Image (cartoon, helix red, strand yellow):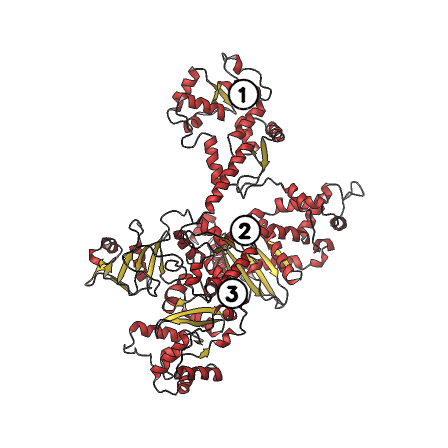
């Protein structure tokens, strides 16, 4: 609040109210919408129908076309008219009665398809009819019957509606095209919307979803406007509420919008680099002698003292004085400043700009130049990248009208073109044809460099960011989002709640996961054991379990196993005393071991994770450890708590092979972003890569994924979501010294040992539970083996601060104690890394270097 009062001039009450308003919004939805976060909340209205609010402070120019496209997608899918309203900070959509949720695929629209959706749906908006009426009035198609008398607005609307009804029969009607052009270019910001959608697909912008019982404070402000708009909806003329589609002549529209729009194609770095070369500012292009400076003046034109110094290797003033003494350069005054010009330009500067030239020049330099302005403007174009006409006028000191006339004449001669060239630009620009040709070639070369495969380190930087580890969110919604992304992935049980979920959910609470399990929304299933008290499990939402959880392949056989299986099949979900009686064996330990055999095999599950936590805690203490007070229960051991049931009913109805393959392929794509054969094999998908390859190929043919060689050193069959591929390549040139990343070695976001091979080291690192890997710029720096007694380091050239990352494991409570006995195969105290570890807080112990919480 101190910042609000000091920098924004708010008094104490206003600052407190604003802070409370923002705090209430964050507590309600779990996030605040900003330029990097968009919140989609869904809630019932007064009648019980569902409404969706997309909260994003992006402005109406971006949100209006987005709302129109969302409405078009919903109308196409549901066959119903959908109401939508937009403002500067959000979109409100009223869903039909039968629609419970707004699917994310209706919001995350393909950036390449957004313009077609908007154009197709545009005439269903009152915005279009308003601009059509104004365009028709400007074209004198709505004349006044009585001169000097005002025509009522409702009558203007009526006439415009009649004209629009006739114009709908003629897609090439000029007023339709003009109204469409005006809305698409002057009212909407489609390039900005495409950029937002690309960032959403690449997860550079987060989309936070929240299902609420009532609207959040931000949404209530939008709903107030909704009531104001639709309370008197029936008062609007019929033409304003028309839902008819308009089939515009797209070729004519494309000509009207301008075909020479290369803003999204030309590379900004290519433009900047070429301009430096054309201006003699690049390395190796500066003048080193008087002859070089003379050539530069003839090529670039007159230059001021500072400009000469920037383009010269030595003493620019001395070189300029030498040219003046030799009569090869003259001092002139252009646009109100003194500059040095080549003597050959004297006639052009005199006749084109009215510059006074010194006497005594050779007659060859002072001959009349009838096309002086044309030549000067063309030289400016030859020595610059895309430019504005106002830039030329300011440089030459000419009226803008004369510059525009010269540019139009050069355009007719094919020497310059006009259009949109600079990324992010908005005004019409000009560019010399040869310069544009060179820019296209360089941009194409840059694009070809971009499509070259990235190395494995880039993939290791990409995966944690793609899976949300760089900026985890708090709360149950963040947990549900993390589970959604991890569905079906086999995760070592010991690290699920110590590393995997806390890395994705800030301030993770086990109770939140228990609540989802108890409510029946989420289930957990064993995916193979690593002994009687360890194994891997998979989480899945109940409705997705049939397609993502494979049926057990190996069923443990034994008298107790069969008895437990038959009891659960006939009696249903049961507690431990019932299972103990059904087993017919008085030895609890034997029955408990058989029960967990069924769990690890994927046949039996529980409605809570409490027994799994108890089993892992017992394993950590040791099987023969004396029970702690409070761990004995009347109903049985803690590792048998809760209600047990068979997994088989959760997998019904059994999906077809095609449905299962499609669900697994799409889930793998969502989890990995860039999916390779190695990643699929590492997750032990039933049937391997061949089981999902057909689906991936079909998605590629449908244009939903891309296939190529994206990561070097991996197989050629790689598939990527468009947004993921863009984000992967954006990390190629990430600056050195990125924040360190310390991951559990078996975390799905850690690719080494699965998708990528381990680099050489003095040991044998593996993806075992309890081991940790420190990544620096995506490259392995240090590996802490299970038990925290042995350390391996990689690549001696990596100068990352991995000792501090190891220390953070203890400080964050992920590891209780690190006691390093050996580092890279030698005693820890003799290792060359010992000093760095001491600086990070490690102290000498009788076994080596230790750090305790």
Quarter of the figure that contains the N terminus:
bottom left
Q: Are marks 3 and 2 in contact (CB under 8 Å)?
A: no
In front of the other: label 3 or label 2?
3
Q: Which residue corresponds to the image point at 53% horizontal and 27% vertical from the top-left?
A: 379
Residue under the image location 66 percent in, 62 percent down:
79
Expressed as whole percent of the image width and height from the top left, the position of residue 50 reads: 60, 65
Q: Earlier in the sequence, mark 2 or mark 1?
A: 2
Q: Which mark is residue 661?
A: 3
Give the residue furthest to the right: 146
How far apart marks 2 and 1 lie (CA) works out to 48 Å
Tell me the tag on residue 349.
1
SS for dot 3: helix
Q: Earlier in the sequence, mark 3 or mark 2?
A: 2
Q: Residue furthest left?
A: 846
Distance CA(mark 3)–CA(mark 2): 38 Å
Q: Secondary structure at mark 2?
A: loop
Few, some or many C-alpha atoms within 10 Å of disc 1 (few <14, some 14-19, many ≥20)?
Answer: many
């Amino acid at each position: 609040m101190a910042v609000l009062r000091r920098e924004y001039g708010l008094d104490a009450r206003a600052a407190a109210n604003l802070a409370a308003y923002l705090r209430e919004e964050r507590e309600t939805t779990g996030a605040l919408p900003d330029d990097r976060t968009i919140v989609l909340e869904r809630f019932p209205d007064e009648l019980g129908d569902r409404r969706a609010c997309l909260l994003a402070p992006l402005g109406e120019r971006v949100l209006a076309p987005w709302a129109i496209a969302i409405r078009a997608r919903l109308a196409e899918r549901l066959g119903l008219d959908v109401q939508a309203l937009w403002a500067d900070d959000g979109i409100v959509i009223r869903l039909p009665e039968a629609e419970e949720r707004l699917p994310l695929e209706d919001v995350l629209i393909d950036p390449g398809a957004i313009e077609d959706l908007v154009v197709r749906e545009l005439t269903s908006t009152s915005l279009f009819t308003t601009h059509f009426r104004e365009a028709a009035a400007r074209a004198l198609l709505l004349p006044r019957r009585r001169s000097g008398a005002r025509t009522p607005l409702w009558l203007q609307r009526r006439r415009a509606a009649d004209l629009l009804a006739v114009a709908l029969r003629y897609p090439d009607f000029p007023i339709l095209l003009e109204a469409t052009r005006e809305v698409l270019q002057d009212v909407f910001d489609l390039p900005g919307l495409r950029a937002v959608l690309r960032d959403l697909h690449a997860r550079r912008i987060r989309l936070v979803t929240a299902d609420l019982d009532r609207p959040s404070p931000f949404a209530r402000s939008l709903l107030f406007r909704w009531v104001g708009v639709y309370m008197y909806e029936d008062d609007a003329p019929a033409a304003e509420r028309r839902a008819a589609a308009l089939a515009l002549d797209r070729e004519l529209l494309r000509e009207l919008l301008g075909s020479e729009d290369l803003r999204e194609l030309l590379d900004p770095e290519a433009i900047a680099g070429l301009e430096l070369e054309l201006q003699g500012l690049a390395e190796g292009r500066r003048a080193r002698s008087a002859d070089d400076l003379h050539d530069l003046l003839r090529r670039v034109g007159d230059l001021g003292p500072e400009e000469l110094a920037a383009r010269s290797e030595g003493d620019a003033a001395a070189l300029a004085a030498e040219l003046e003494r030799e009569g090869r350069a003259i001092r002139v005054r252009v646009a109100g400043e003194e500059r040095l010009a080549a003597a050959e330009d004297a006639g052009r500067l005199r006749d084109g700009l009215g510059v006074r030239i010194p006497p005594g020049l050779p007659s060859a330099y002072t001959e009349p130049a009838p096309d002086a302005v044309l030549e000067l403007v063309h030289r400016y174009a030859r020595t610059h990248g895309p430019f504005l006409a106002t830039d030329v006028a300011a440089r030459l000191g000419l009226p803008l009208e004369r510059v525009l006339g010269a540019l139009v004449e050069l355009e007719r001669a094919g020497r310059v073109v006009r259009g949109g060239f600079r990324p992010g630009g908005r005004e019409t620009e000009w560019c010399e044809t040869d310069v544009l040709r060179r820019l296209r070639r360089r941009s194409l070369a840059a694009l070809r460099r971009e499509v070259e495969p990235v190395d494995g380190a880039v993939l290791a930087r990409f995966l944690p960011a793609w899976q949300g580890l760089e900026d985890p969110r708090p709360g149950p919604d963040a947990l549900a989002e993390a589970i959604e992304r991890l569905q079906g992935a086999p995760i070592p049980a010991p690290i699920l709640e110590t590393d995997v979920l806390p890395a994705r959910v800030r301030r993770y609470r086990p109770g939140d996961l228990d609540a989802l399990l108890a409510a029946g929304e989420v289930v957990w299933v064993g995916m193979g054991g690593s002994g009687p008290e360890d194994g891997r499990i998979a989480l899945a939402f109940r409705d997705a379990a049939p397609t993502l959880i494979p049926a057990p392949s190996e069923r443990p056989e034994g008298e107790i196993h069969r008895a437990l299986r038959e009891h659960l099949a006939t009696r249903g979900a049961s507690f431990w005393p019932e299972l103990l009686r059904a087993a017919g064996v008085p030895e609890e330990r034997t029955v408990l071991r058989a029960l967990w055999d069924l769990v690890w095999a994927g046949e039996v599950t529980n409605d809570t994770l409490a027994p799994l936590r108890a089993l892992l805690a017992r394993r950590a203490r040791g099987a023969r450890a004396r029970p702690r007070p409070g761990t004995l229960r009347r109903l049985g051991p803690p590792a048998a708590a809760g209600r047990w049931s068979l997994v088989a009913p959760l997998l019904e109805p059994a999906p077809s092979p095609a449905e299962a393959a499609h669900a697994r392929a799409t889930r793998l794509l969502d989890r990995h972003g860039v999916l390779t054969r190695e990643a699929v094999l590492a997750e032990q998908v039933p049937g391997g890569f061949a089981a999902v390859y057909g689906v991936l190929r079909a998605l590629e043919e449908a244009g939903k994924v891309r296939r190529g060689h994206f990561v070097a050193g991996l197989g050629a069959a790689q598939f990527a979501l468009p947004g993921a591929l863009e984000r992967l390549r954006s990390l190629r040139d990430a600056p050195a010294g990125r924040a360190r990343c310390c991951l559990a070695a078996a975390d799905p976001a850690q690719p080494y040992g699965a998708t990528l091979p381990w680099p050489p080291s003095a040991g044998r690192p593996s993806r075992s539970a309890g081991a940790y890997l420190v990544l620096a710029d995506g490259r392995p720096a240090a590996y802490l083996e299970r038990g925290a007694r042995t350390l391996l380091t990689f690549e001696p050239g990596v100068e990352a601060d991995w000792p501090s990352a190891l220390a953070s494991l203890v400080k964050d409570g992920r590891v209780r104690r690190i006691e390093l006995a050996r580092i890279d195969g030698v005693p820890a105290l003799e290792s060359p890394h010992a000093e760095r570890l001491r600086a990070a807080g490690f102290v000498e112990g009788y076994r080596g270097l230790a750090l305790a919480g």
